[in-house]
Image (cartoon, rainbow, N blue to C red):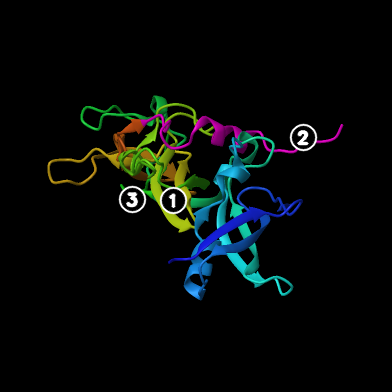
Amino acid sequence: MAPTFTMIERANSRSYSIVPTPGESFITIQYLLTCDSGTPDEASILSAAGSPPSRIASGIYSGNAYLKTMVIREVTIEPVRERQNAWIVTHRASTRNGSLLSQTDGTYCTCTRATVVRSTAMYRYNPTFPTNGSVTFSGAVDIAGDKVDTNGKPKVYDVPQQLVTIETQYDRTLPQSGPAAEPDWATYTSYVGARNSAVFLNFPIGTLLYQGFQTAPEDNYYRLSHTFLYDAWYHLEQIPAPNPTGEPILVAGVSIGTPSVPILQVKDVVFLQRFGTTAAFSGILPAAALTALTSPKPLAIA
């Protein structure tokens, strides 16, 4: 006959170690495991004591939403020397989700930024940018501004850019109701190459390009990184209007030097927008994550 066991939580055995998200917060629980009948062997003792990774006992979390996120990471078993067929079982469980007080307090979202530049051809300095950077290349009008090319040769201009990385956390544990616990990969992918159609993270419409995401599992969570690229020129490029042979159409331009030397310059210049798709990016960051990003805690002391 297979041995039977009883495992009872020891009084006042729970202890907590709480850290900010996404750090790992722990609960340690001790039980008394006893063999009620039969002859216990190593395999039956290990089975009765529980094993990682699994959820903590329902009697521990009860209706507490935070404790329900705890996962057993380590189990230790020590014999009670003064008692036959009895063991002290310690469960060390942890979570990276939230805090004891409120799930929303633990929403994890962080933003890193770095300045970069894009070197591009500049025929006109201080041109007139189209609204939100949206333009139709066919039939586009001259972008105005100051001519700076020399005989059709453009200057090289470093457009200010900002590389923005948003990191969030996602619980990848499968729900009991069905296997639907993956992030919305398809929505993320559909945004790649799109510019923002609404103000996002205070960036003006049309200036922020979604470049994609990167993910890696960590315990039962995903660490998600979304990369965006801000461009002061709305990601536009200056293109000279060509003649039938493909060369820029040149007309008399400015004179430079002393004595002055007249030069030819490009007649018409238009904008090319390679990223014509726009999106609101509402499917990337949930409202709680944006709040955590824009309203960090704790509050300053007056």
Which residue matches tag 3?
A: 153
- Horizontal side of 141 relative to 56 (left or right) equals left
Q: Is residue 108 visible?
A: no
Q: Which mark is residue 248?
A: none
Which numbered disc, 1 or 3, marks the residue that appears first in the sequence?
1
Q: Nearer the viewer, mark 2 or mark 3?
A: 2
Q: Which amino acid type corresponds to the residue marked 2 in the rendered image?
A: Leu
Q: Judge whether residue 283 is colored magenta.
A: yes
Magenta residues, dominant SS class: loop
Which type of secondary structure does the marked residue at label 2 adopt?
Answer: loop
Report the residue that reaches farthest toward the left: 244
Which numbered disc, 1 or 2, marks the residue that appears first in the sequence?
1
Which residue matches tag 2?
A: 299
Q: Which amino acid type corresponds to the residue marked 3 in the rendered image?
A: Lys
Q: Quadrant of the N terminus?
A: bottom left
Which residue matches tag 1?
A: 118
- Horizontal side of 262 relative to 218 (left or right) equals left
Label 1 packing within 10 angstroms: few (<14), some (14-19), many (20+): some
Q: Residue at x 64, y 67 (%)?
A: 86
Boundaries of the magenta span: 279-302
Q: Nearer the viewer, mark 1 or mark 3?
A: 1
Which type of secondary structure does the marked residue at label 3 adopt?
Answer: loop
Q: Judge whether residue 120 is colored magenta.
A: no
- Percent across and percent down for residue 133 are 38, 31
Q: Rounded to the nearest whole Å, what is the CA distance between mark 1 and mark 3?
A: 18 Å
